[in-house]
Image (cartoon, grey):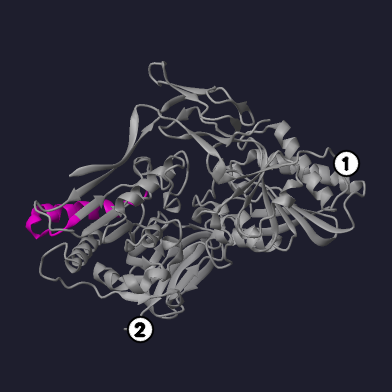
Amino acid sequence: MIETVISIGLPVREKLVIKKNRLQPEKLQNRPKRIAIVTGIHGDELEGQFVCYEVTRRIRENIDKLNGIVDIYPCLNPLGMDAVYRNVPKTEIDMNRMFPGNTEGPMIEKVASAIVADIAGSDMCVDLHSSDTFIREVPQVRLSEVWADHLLPYAKLMNVNMIWKNATKTVDESTLGYSLNMLGTPTIVVEMGIGNHIDQSNGMQLADGIFRLMNHLGIWKDEPQQGVEPLVSSDGEIEFIRADESGVFLPCIEYNCEVKTGDKIGDIINPLSGEIIKSYYASVCGLVFSLREYPMVYAGSLLARIIKNDRR
Amino acid sequence: MYLDSICSYHSPYREDFTINGYRFGKGDKAACILGPIRGNEIQQLYICSQLVKKLKELEAKGCISSGKEILVIPCVNHFSINTASRFWAVDNTDINRMFPGTDYGDTTSRIARDVLDAIHEYTYGIQFASFYMSGEFVPHVRMMETGYQNTSLANLFGLPYVMVRKPKPIDTKTLNYNWQNEETAAFSVYTNKNDEIDPVSAKQAVSSVLRFLTRMGIVKYESHSGYISHIINEEDLSNVYTKTAGIFHNYVNAGAEVKYGDLMAEITDPYEGNIVEKIIAPTDGIVFFKQAEPLVNESDIVYRMIHRLHE
């Protein structure tokens, strides 16, 4: 059942409408469990669109296995998504820095507040992101250190390649994930892929993870499925490789590959002089879970992130 | 006065991004004044340029107190101004949401760190800032309620109002919040414009800073005493909302006194031109903030009023 979370009139003959699709069995048990799948806070993050489609499709085709409520919110920033713009158009505000919002604030704060109010009380929320247009990410869960211990068992069910505890920027205060966790709704933040792109294999992997999670919560009744055993790390076990020069970055590895200490990651070149400005190498063994796709860099630009892999 | 480089970043395709500061006087790090961090803060750029001009004149006359240093950074982000981008042009991040920054983080986080490193030892910090909502304010000094805020000091600017804002999560990454946490007495000065220049309120802002510096014994400058500021908490402002979206016709400006029932604005239908809503003052008071866009959404905040205050 398609429902409206909030609707606000725009200046010229249009409404900003946030919609959700509520999926539930014909007969609901008393106090049914509820999960929220949300995505599209950033207008350039599209991976979640396929996940929403795939989760809904599987539920509709196997509705007899549904034993709770699944709320799908495919687009929390419809204007941004329509305009191929990460933030909220016109205001230029990053919507994921406006939570928990304010019912008496400007439009974007009202919208944020309505979204939080609608999701709060769910037994679980999965907030799907897909990096930005600069960095490609392997499917991963990012947890705030505050709730990491509580959320880790659920995150391990998500069928992701890695779990990053204390990934501060994505899960800090003023994000949807942080706000919902503060309100007692366990929320897992997923990052995968790259902005303005859909990788269906990532989507399938995540959809499998969501069904594992729903199975565990009793919202889905099916045989337990095997999933990916994720690498789990906190900040200290992650190597950040950042540019310390500006120029054009040319990677010489693929993302989602294993590297050894000393392996070359890539070069920053100067297209004007035809020179290599600097080459970058791994200083740990592990999985390259983030790799720069957008070539132009300044000092400080992220080139790659490697999670140490002691299993090798 | 001498020009100093605060930090510099090499750019692949543009000239190096260098933040410059003008240092006046020598001695204790007495006051630091900061211009635009966002690319649409043109009024703030103009105010800082006028302040630099005035401080150069004062220094030439020996009116900077001995043993006191003033640093003016007229622009933190000229790269965004030159490309008409509100935020950092490369990745659209807001430097004023990157403080305190890190020296091993993203580019804008490093810029924030470099700036804070250069300014955190000053006793007084003044930023010409802009609000995240587009609109016009009554000139005022704004402070975050961090526990370090001192409204009595803010009074010394002699602007009509001092506003104290309870920080929300989004505020904890701003310069003002982090500057106060570094134990600088930090103030944000707001005038009525951002992306266009209003010379009258710019002059008022320059005078207010010189008045403050004079009262703190940092410069010698004879000026009018200004106002005894009215101190307000942001949460006490009364919001005036639209009920209907459309074309906004404003009839009152920031600073105006209105009475309960006065017509403040009308909204007309964008296709048919008829009036679809009259916005009536919900209370007596002073208009503290006025939204400045020609178009409005349903339930937008179009005014923020100081309830039952008279001129």
Whole-percent x and y of residue B19? Answer: 68, 54
Question: Mark 1: few, some, or many residues within 10 Å (few <14, many ≥20)?
Answer: few
Please count the marks in the image.
2
Q: Amino acid at mark 2?
A: Asp
User: Image point 37% across, 71% down: which residue?
Assistant: A148
Query: Magenta span has A67?
Result: yes
Residue B35, visible in the rendered structure: yes
Distance, label 1 to label 2, CA atoms, is 70 Å
Tell whether A41 sits left or right of A209.
right
**Residue A246 in view:** no
Q: Which mark is residue B39?
A: none
Rendered image quadrant of residue A12:
top left
Q: Quadrant of residue A150?
A: bottom left
What kind of element bears circle 1? loop
Q: Up-down: is B291 above or below B166?
A: above
Question: Is residue B267 shown left or right of residue A115?
Answer: right
Q: Residue at x 92, y 46 (%)?
A: B61
User: What secondary structure is the stretch in magenta mostly built from?
Assistant: helix
Q: Name the chain under label 1.
A: B
Residue type at mark 1 is Glu
Q: Which residue is mark 1?
A: B222
Mark 2: secondary structure: loop
User: According to the image, label 2 marks what residue?
Assistant: A310
Q: Can you say whether B60 is above or below B105 in the image?
A: above
Q: Can you tell which of label 1 and label 2 is closer to the viewer?
A: 1
User: Is residue B137 within the magenta segment?
Assistant: no
Chain assignment, label 2: A
Foreground of the two, A250 or A305: A305
Percent across and percent down for residue B9 are 62, 58
Residues drawn in magenta: A44-69
**Residue B205 occupies which quadrant of the picture?**
top right
Q: Residue at x 50, y 70 (%)?
A: A279
